[in-house]
Image (cartoon, helix red, strand yellow):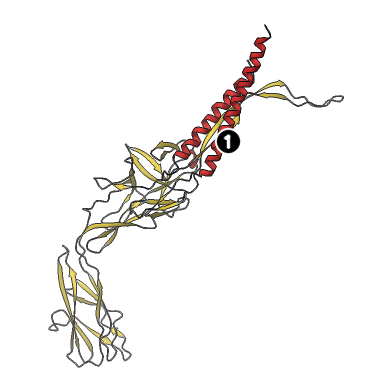
Amino acid sequence: MLRSLYSGISGLRAHQTMLDVTGNNIANVNTAGFKASSTQFQDTLSQMTQGASGPQAETGGSNPAQIGLGVRVAGVSTNFAQGSSQSTGRATDMMISGDGFFVTSKGGQQLFTRAGAFNPDAAGQLVSPDGGILQGWPADNNGVVNTGGPVSGITLNSNTLVPANKTSTVAVDGNLPSDAVNGTKLERVVKTYDAQGAEKNLALTFSKTLAGWDVSTDGGATTDGSLVFDGSGVLTSGNPVTVSGGTITVNLPTVTSYAGLTSLAISGQNGSAAGKLESFTLGNDGSLIGSFSNGVKQVLAKIALAKFTNPSGLEKAGGSSYVATANSGGVQLGGAGDAGIGSLSGGSLEMSNVDLSQEFTNLIVAQRGFQANARIITTSDEVLQELGNLKR
């Protein structure tokens, strides 16, 4: 049989594969995090009809004569170029700018994806549309994350509580009037918290004396500490003051004493009641920062991102996810901002990197290639028909 007949068949198969790959790219033009694929062809073995010979004293050399036996698909490669950003405004939508991958777990299998559309499920876990659980490092009760430990599913439970924090320091700033009459009292009230988060008002009384100002918590009956200022109105001694039986420290490093101005004020305290999780935001380093009803902001978890030596070696597993292979290299876990991983942003998704103009061009090229190879088969058939007619 004619070699061209089988060459044409191999061309049909190869260009059909190219059509399949191109069609899949176009179908996923609006799939978040999708990476386009491309088809590479290569020729098959060639039949040797004449070998090469080297030049002789009286004769020149000759080149080999070979007849190709068709084409085959050498491979289908994935283009991991960065896709465009699409703003969604949803806190659970995330986008990686760089070469990293989100890590998910589904059915005990570790998967990797560029699609950052996650939603909380009934258990409070952040999951992908197909049920993959987003992986990361949970924080302890103090908001500390151990990125050296194993990853686990990230859970954002609305019933998450931050424990009460007992007040241990109170900060005061402003000015105490140096020209006040001795015996003048200024009272400032600050809300403090005990170990269970119960509120208690702490009244600080500042009484003018010849030496400066005394500080007390019982209206001036008992002095807890004395503030002394130099001739320039700068505090020289008395900071800090310990009150409430030595359990609360009052810091007054910026308090001054100038004439004609009374601006003493409580600038803050470090205690808080217990709080319930209300919302969360995504930090630049991939940390999920919870906002609690008591005003406290604390890290809940940190999202784990993965990188590979050869991302093109990853195997597509469906659901916009990949699995590691022998040629992708081992998974290397890290956080946003680490070398080779990239940055992470919330409220947006990475769009597909399919270039429609290029894909439609590839569609035409594949179609014409298919037609040309079909013509080879038709022509070869006509030649065989002529051979059959020689017998008549």
Residue 138 location (% of width, % of height): 30, 51
Q: Is residue 305 visible?
A: yes
Name the one closer to the observer, 390 or 62.
Answer: 390
Q: Which residue is mark 1?
A: 365
In the displayed structure, does residue 224 sit left or right of residue 334? left
In the rendered image, the residue lying farthest to the front is: 392
Q: Is residue 176 above or below residue 14?
A: below
Q: Nearer the viewer, residue 50 or 381?
A: 381
Q: Amino acid at mark 1?
A: Val
Residue 114's spot in the image, x, y percent?
42, 45
SS at circle 1:
helix
- Is 48 rendered above or below residue 257? above
Which residue is nearer to you in this view: 250 or 172?
172
Rendering coords of residue 101 (x, y %): 42, 46
Q: Residue at x 38, y 44 (%)?
A: 103
Residue drawn 29% across the image and 89% down it: 258
Q: Please give left or right for residue 109 compared with residue 98 in the image.
A: left
- Spot occupied by residue 111 in the image (x, y as percentages of width and height): 38, 40
**271 to the left or right of 317:** left
